[in-house]
Each structure stands twice: as structure tokens, then as C-alpha cells.
Image: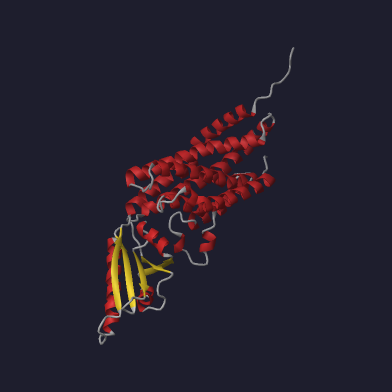
Amino acid sequence: MNNTYKKPGQMKAYLALAWYSFRAQTRNPATFFFGFIFPIVFISIFGLIGNNEPQILVGIPTDSEPENQISATLKKQSFIKIVDGDIASLKDKLTQGKIAAILYISKGENVRQQVDLTLSSGLPQEASRIKSVVTGLVDKANLKNAGVTDPDIFIIEKELEGRKPRYIDFAVPGQIGFALLSTAIFGTVFGLIYLKKALILKRMFATPTKALTILLAQGTSRLIVALAQTALILLMAVLVFQFYLPNGWITFLQLMLISALGLVAFLGFGYLIAGLSSDENAASPLTNLVTLPQFLLSGTFFPTESLPTWLQPVANNLPLSYFNQAVRKLTTEGGTLADTLPMMIGLLVWGALMYLIAARTFKWQ
């Protein structure tokens, strides 16, 4: 009698484990709520809120005349926020609806100063208010020099086509990141802890299945769920709230690719916490320590520019911040995949670091 035991192939084990993990996720209420229901509810709320900008953003090029009373007075206004940068980047922001106007002051040929005011057609109310303020400041400055034959300051007004910004355009990228990080950490941590406590991992090790195969199967199942989350969020945002995709399906596919890379990076945090924790009580504080600061500081619900200046360098370099910045680079800014490369490198560096630590600290029992 031949008692030779034939070892199953790693691919067969991988597919079986991935299918089991996928079914476990679909039956997990936490995964369903945080991955699908929660982002959809937030998108619906943000889409109905509309846009309430507390300040009017005005761009002043770095090579604008520094010593002038017009820009100095504007900087003192509480309802105006000055945005610095070169003229090309400011024009990009104006056409994207990020700023309402560009104010450029230079020396004229026959006058002491020339004021070039470029307004955004996408922000008519803000542009009209800025125009009124700047015109008033120019008239006031000229009245001080009433004895001069020609006015000292001339204003030249222009208008560029601009897209009206909406809060939904900011909220959708944040909700995609929220869903992916939740799936990668909460689903992975508590899923693997359950396998530990139920001694399923121990039984798996009694088979020829390799540890890497187990983790790859877990990751693949979560990748499928993550892509479904991203697709659902984007489809609802586009069909219901006319979310802006600059290049249509091309942008959609680019977002799916970035979401897949983001999920892979975020999984490193999930594996690290799951490896260090033996039960739910030990895992909960660690998961909250990793997720809550990122949800609050990474531009998920509000821009990082709203944070205190000293906190912004930290907030802008969190893993979820890199992901949110990359998604908004493709959507609200109309950039390309090449433009997202610095953000994705930062995100993947975070992920690689977590995988390295997890590989050295993971406890299977």
C-alpha cells in the first residue's frame, strides 16, 4: 500500500485561503459598516452641505512689487488669505477654483505702479468682492495724490475661466482613504486575531502551507474588498453628486491603481498590530493609536492647512495624508500619475517600514 503523502501546491492553498478570507470579510459587520456604509453616509452629508469658504483666497506672485500699499492692506483683512507662489502655479490654482483672484503689482512705464487683477469666473461672488476691495484701495491711494496730473496707480482687470469648487470634491478622496485604511487595519487585525484564538493559524502551520501564502491570501481578499469600496464610492459620487473626474474613465482607472497601492501600504500597519496583539483587548488601543490621528490630521474631513502651523509638517507626512494628496492631485488638480509619484513613494516607504517591523515581531500564536 502506497502511503506517500502528496503536498498540496502553494497556489491551491493560496486561492483557498483568499476565498475563505474574502467570505469572512463579507460576513463581518464591522468591515461592511466602516468600509461601505460609513463613507457613503459621509459623502451624502458632504454633498448636501455645499461649499462654505470662511476666507477668500488671493494669489500674489513672489515677483510682485514688494513695497506697495495695496497688497499690504489686503494682508490685514481678516476675510482674505494671501497665497504665495510663482505666476504659473497661481494660474493653475485659479483655473482649478482654489483661489479667487491673482493680484500682480509692477512698475508701469508712465505711472508709479500698475495693478494687474486676474479674476476667476468660477468664483463670481468672491471675485466680485475682491475686485471691489482692490478698486477701492486704488481709488483711495490716488485720492491722496489728487494734485498729480496723472494717477499714480492704474488697475488692469482680467478674467480666467475657473471651476467652482465644492466640498464634495474635497470629501470624496478623504472617504476613499478612510475606507481603505479601515479595511487594511480593522479587518486585518481582528481577522487575524480571530484566527489565532480559534487555533486556525496553528492548524494551518500543521499543513505544508507557508506563512507567506497565508498573508498573501489575506491581503488579496482585502484588496478585492478595497477595490469594490473605491469603485462604489466613486460611482456614487460621480452619478449622484457629479464628482469631478478630469479625464473620465482614465482618471477612474488611475484612482483604482492608486487605491490598490494604498491598500498594500496600509496592510503593513494591520499586519504589525495583528502580530503584536494576542487578543482584541490588546489590539484596540493600538488600532486607535494608528488610525485616529490619521483620520483627524490627514486631510480626511478638513484641509491640513486649517491645522496650526507647527502641526502641519507632521500632518502632511502621515501615510493617509500621502494617499489623500495623491488622489486630489488626480481629481481636483487634474494631474497625472507622474505628479503623484512623490506622494506614492512616501506612502510605500511607510508601508515597507511597517512590513519590515512586522516580519520581525509577528507572533502566530
Q: Is residue 300 visible?
A: yes
- Nearest the viewer among 222 and 344 is 344
| Percent of width and height locating residue 123 | 30, 60
Residue sitting at x 45%, y 38%: 228
Residue sitting at x 30%, y 73%: 134
Q: Is residue 33 visible?
A: no
Q: Is residue 207 above or below residue 338?
A: above
Give left or right: position of 113 versus 26: left
Q: Is residue 35 above or below residue 64?
A: above
| Percent of width and height locating residue 18 | 56, 32
Residue sitting at x 41%, y 40%: 232
Residue sitting at x 37%, y 45%: 237
- Nearest the viewer among 236 and 61 is 61
- Nearest the viewer among 130 and 185 is 130
Q: Quadrant of residue 194?
A: top right
Q: Which image quarter holds the C terminus?
A: top right
